[in-house]
Amino acid sequence: MSYVSSMRCKECSREYPVGAFNVCDFCFGPLEVVYDYDAIAEVTSRERIMSGPNSLWRYADFLPADYNPDVDINAGFTPLIRSKGLAEHLGLNELWIKNDSVNPSYSFKDRVVAVATAKALELGFDTIACASTGNLACAVAAHAARGGLKSYVFIPSDLETGKVLGAAIYGPTMIAIDGTYDDVNRLCSELAEEHPWAFVNINVRPFYADGSKTLGFEVAEQLGWRAPMHAVVPSASGAMFTKIYQGLKEFERTGLIDSVQTKMHSTQPRGCCPIATAYEEGRFVIRPVKASSLATSLAIGNPADGYYALKTIEASGGSAVIAEEHEVALGVKLLAETEGIFTEGAGGVAVMGLKHLVELGRIQPDESTVVYITGNGLKTTELVADVVHPLHIEPTVEAFEQAIAASTA
Ligand SMILES: *Cc1c(COP(=O)(O)O)cnc(C)c1O
Ligand SMILES: [Zn+2]
């Protein structure tokens, strides 16, 4: 059973019963899920969590839906890897990589969709849908396939082939739209009014968002029940960023870990950095931008949770940094060459953002740091085509020796 007591408006605090809506009727503020933390504290323990499944459902006491094997594809509980090569490169002594690129559909979006889909079924839906920058479409289509649900996934038409095919293969109804993600999202908000579907990131968004808390829980557990000094996170809507922090604070509040000192750092690419720009200019008002970035999964020009991401930065003593567009592929390459992990553009942004945070002195060498790698590079191979140089030869020993000599010259 879940420990949800109600839904609440983040702005005016009006309470609502639990249902498929995400906006306050009175002030149009976003709704969030309210939990009974005293009840959770009574039942939860490190042992109880450790004896749970090797998926995000080991944290079910903190989630708004019950585990449902019918739609489970084993999202979460991904590796946390102690960095060697990247840490050395950056001069850090305790760097950890949360490798969420190895989820079932190859991005952290499996977490949010696992929770949203389980909740949608509890609420009686038979169809799930989403407005996506790519990875969400993959996760929605995969979970729908597993659960025998209908699905509609809406994407911008200019996405990488790996994301389009990586979602289409699961058999959703896929709709590519000539426009930006923000156009897709606006259309889906209108469609959510017309159709009885659970749009995971629209009408059931409060439940969806809480799936990302597990990225905080897991890191704390995997670090031996402690929170890191710094978390470096790629942001689009800003939802994951705020929820990682909420997850850490919930573990603190229920006595699972000591006081959380984690500074939350948001990273964005130059071509779409409304949160980081607001941070740099010291304002809490997000100015929407026309998004255009090589890190397509971060290209949300009007971030729904941008304001709350800025509040999380403030509350945690963190910051925001920008990776230049030309750095996106370099960050992907750097992580691959130093750690053996092939991430997509969002991961490249996180890695280069981390580099800038170290250069700026915001992260000191001995401070424990986790960088979140949220998506898989095999979906966005176009991005790195120009930064790698495989040799191509005739099948002769001479050709091989010549090519090697030329490449090492
Ligand atoms: C969606 C996505 C993000 C951003 O998540 P938000 O919650 O929208 O900030 C980051 N990385 C990857 C790979 C994504 O797919
Ligand atoms: Zn309200």
Image (cartoon, rainbow, N blue to C red):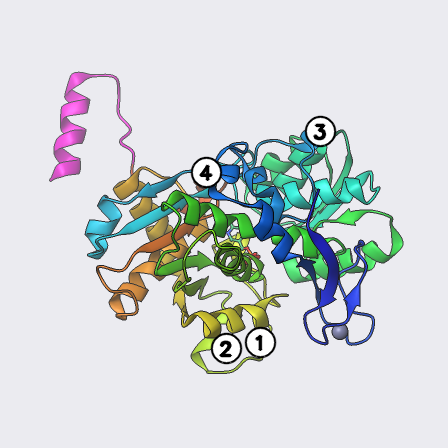
User: Which is nearer the eye, 48 or 329?
Assistant: 48
- Looking at the image, is mark 1 or mark 2 earlier in the sequence? 2
Rounded to the nearest angstrom, the CA distance separating label 1 from label 3 is: 40 Å
User: Which is nearer the eye, 115 or 161?
Assistant: 115
Rounded to the nearest angstrom, the CA distance separating label 4 from label 2 is: 32 Å
Name which residue lies at 33% across and 52% down.
330
Look at mark 3 in the image and give the residue it sits on.
70
Residue 174: percent from left, percent from top: 72, 41
Mark 3 Cα shell of 10 Å, populated few (<14), some (14-19), many (≥20): few
Q: Which mark is residue 78?
A: 4
Rounded to the nearest angstrom, the CA distance separating label 1 from label 2 is: 6 Å
> Count of labels shown?
4
- Looking at the image, is mark 4 or mark 2 earlier in the sequence? 4
Q: Which mark is residue 286?
A: 1
**Magenta-drawn segment:** 390-409
Q: Are the residues tagged 3 and 4 within 8 Å (C-beta)?
A: no
Rounded to the nearest angstrom, the CA distance separating label 3 from label 2 is: 42 Å
**Amino acid found under the numbered disc labelled 1:** Ile
Would residue 58 be counted in the magenta stretch? no
Q: Are the residues tagged 1 and 2 within 8 Å (C-beta)?
A: yes
Q: Quadrant of the C terminus?
A: top left
- Is residue 142 visible in this depiction of the protein? yes
Residue 366: percent from left, percent from top: 22, 59
Which SS class for mark 1? loop
Rounded to the nearest angstrom, the CA distance separating label 4 from label 1 is: 32 Å
- Looking at the image, is mark 3 or mark 4 earlier in the sequence? 3
Mark 2 Cα shell of 10 Å, populated few (<14), some (14-19), many (≥20): some
**Amino acid found under the numbered disc labelled 2:** Ala
- Looking at the image, is mark 1 or mark 3 earlier in the sequence? 3
Mark 4 Cα shell of 10 Å, populated few (<14), some (14-19), many (≥20): many
Look at mark 2 in the image and give the residue it sits on.
278
